[in-house]
Each structure stands twice: as structure tokens, then as C-alpha cells.
Amino acid sequence: MILTLIWLVFGLVVLTIGAEFLVRGSSRLAVGVGISPLVVGLTVVAFGTSAPELVVSVQSAFSGNPDVAVGNVVGSNILNVLLILGLSAMIVPLRVEQRLIRFDVPLMIGLSIAMWLLGSDGQYSRWDGLLLFGCLIAYNSWAVLSSRKESVRIQKEYEAEYGPIEKSFRWSILLRNLALLIVGLVFLVLGARWFVDSAVVLAKLMGLTELVIGLTIVALGTSLPEVATSVVAAIKGERDIAVGNVVGSNLFNIMAVLGISSLVAPAGIAVSSAAFWADIPVMIAVAIACLPIFFTGSVINRANGVLFFAYYCAYTAALLLTAMGNGWSPTFNFFLLWFALPLTFLGLGASAWWEWKILQKRGRSSAEEQAGSALPKDTP
């Protein structure tokens, strides 16, 4: 077991280094050939930070471990919102001004529901994969076109992170970034193979299902690039990048990771009943929980961050208690499902309604002030 843990950690380290090289090389390469930093952040970096999930899920699908492949996507999406946004908001409240996010959140909810519906027949076929991959192409095209309408402040925030567009072409920079990109891909493939093989062996040794391993250890390991990117961006005050990376990564996980994995898998990817009836609905609920926060002042405050982080801990505890057959598991799950979750949604709904009323009142006050300033000076 010790040797398996060593290979697991070693594979994770190689996987993380590969993702970092891939993101750094691809983003600088894209900016160097004239692509705007905002487009790079929305597409290239989002895809790069999701590359570990992609490689791990494809490797799992080919190795005959579909639960790891599905659990990786679902677990990563849950982790991205609850853990990464939670930690980022606990560091600094996240006020989001980026207009694209307001489209991406409903799209994230829609794709999460679509993932559940597509898996209703017990598998993700190649046709399902083709549909999701088509959505990816359409989304990227839309993101590139819509990025031109973003505010100057958002443009400068992304430029500060990914660098300004190079004015002159230099072969030395091109070759260096290409080398980073290639080394990153090689590290990703090798790290994913060692990581997945070790995780499956570890699951069997610990008596856990491959789905639970995929939802926890594999999801956490492959999401480390998103953790690093968002937390560092939050510390730097680049709040739109911190949030945009999480939402963009969730979209890419469904459209690219699940889509490509389903396309290349010899017989599609099987969906277990546990994933279909429990974990994917949790992913949908987590996506829906973002809606009132993003559409009422676009603020994720520290209280929301603590709430998200606490729910991630509770969800992970519920998974492990159930998998190990702990006697407290039914009571814990019952409390979480029938008391904690409804109260949370009621609280978020009430908060959203209250903030919406405040925004309406401010809008009316502003309109009255403008109307008053437009009256002639001698009007009684």
C-alpha cells in the first residue's frame, strides 16, 4: 500500500507540473501570436487547467474504469464551486463584473442538467460525446466574439495576468513556449497513467468504490491547477479571473472532458446508478446555488465562501461514511438532504430576493434623481 501511495503522489506531482507547463506555454504562445489576453483566459487557460481531468478521464475510459472517468468530471465540478470558490471568497470577497459570467452560469446549469439527461440510458455514447464537443466549438466561438464587448477594466485585468500582445514576432519566445507546451503534454500523459492506476489499486485496497475515488482523490488531484489559478488570482485581487476560471473549467469539464472521453472510448462510458441518482444531481444543485449569488450584485462574500467550503467538507464526509458502511451514514445523509440543503436554498433565495429589492429601489431612486435634474430651474 505504501508503494501505491508513493506512485499516487508521484503521478499527481508530475500531472500538476505538466498542467502548469501546458497552461504557461499555451497562454504565452497564444498571446504571442496576437490573441487577446481575455480570449486566452476564457478559452486557452480554461482548457489548460482542465487538461488533467481530460487526460485522466480518457485514460480511465480506455482502461475500463468508467466510474473514475465520470466521477472525475462530476467531482471536479462540485469541488470547483464549493472548495475553490469557497476558499477564494474566504480570502477576499469576489465581486464579479465580467458580463460573460452571467451567461456562463445559466449555461453551466443547463449543461449539468443535459449531462444527467444524456446519462439516463446508462451510458455516454459517441453520439453524446459528439453533441457535447459540438457545444464546445459553439461556446468557444461565442466567447471569442463576445469578449470584444467586455469593459476596459476587465481587458486590463486579463492583460496584467497573461501579458500584453507581443508587438514583434520572436522565434526564441515561440520555441521556448512550444517546448513548455510539449513537455507539459508529456508530463500530463505520464502523470495521469501513474495517478489513475494507483488510485484504482488504492480504492480496492481501502474497500472503496472507483466512483468514490473518482469523486474525491482523483477530482481533487486533477483540480489542483484550478485551485492554484483561482486562489492566486483572488490574492492578487484579480477577482474576475478567479471566478471565470472556475465557471469556465466546469463548462470545459462537461463539454470537452466528458465529450472527448465519450468520443474516443471504444464502447462509450457507462454511468453507474449511484452517479446518476446521487452525485450528478448534487452537481446540478451546486450549479443552481451559484445563480442567486451571481445575479444579485454579483458578489460572493466571505459568508458564502464559508458556506460553500462547509458543504464540500460535508459532501466528502457523506461519501466516505457511505462507502465505509459507517452506522452514522444514514442519519448524516438524512440531515444533510432534508434539513441542511433546504434551509440553505431558502437562505440563498431570501438573500437574493432582498438584494434584488435593494437594486430595484436604487434603480428607482436614480431614475427619480435624473428626472428631477432634467426639470427647468424655475419649476415650482
Image: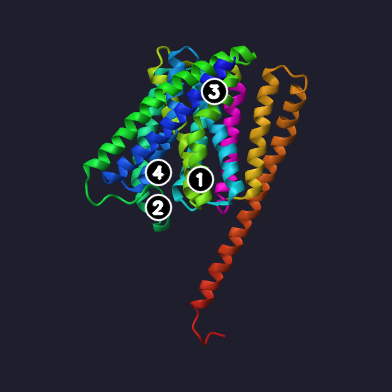
Query: Which residue in the protein does label 4 denote?
Result: 41
Element assignment for label 3: helix
**Residue at mark 4 to residue at mark 1: CA–CA distance:** 14 Å
Is residue 315 shown in magenta? Answer: no
**Residue at mark 3 to residue at mark 2: CA–CA distance:** 35 Å
Lower position in the chain sequence, tag 4 or tag 1: 4
- Residue 138 is situated, as x and y percent measured from the top left of the image, at 36, 36
Residue at screen point 47% across, 17% down: 60
Query: Which residue in the protein does label 2 denote?
Result: 160
Boundaries of the magenta span = 275-299
Lower position in the chain sequence, tag 2 or tag 4: 4
Query: Which residue in the protein does label 1 denote?
Result: 232
Element assignment for label 2: helix
| Label 4 Cα neighbours within 10 Å, binned few <14 / some 14-19 / many ≥20 | many
Total residue callouts: 4
Query: Which residue in the protein does label 3 denote?
Result: 71
Lower position in the chain sequence, tag 3 or tag 4: 4
- Amino acid of disc 1: Val
Q: Give the quadrant of the C terminus.
A: bottom right
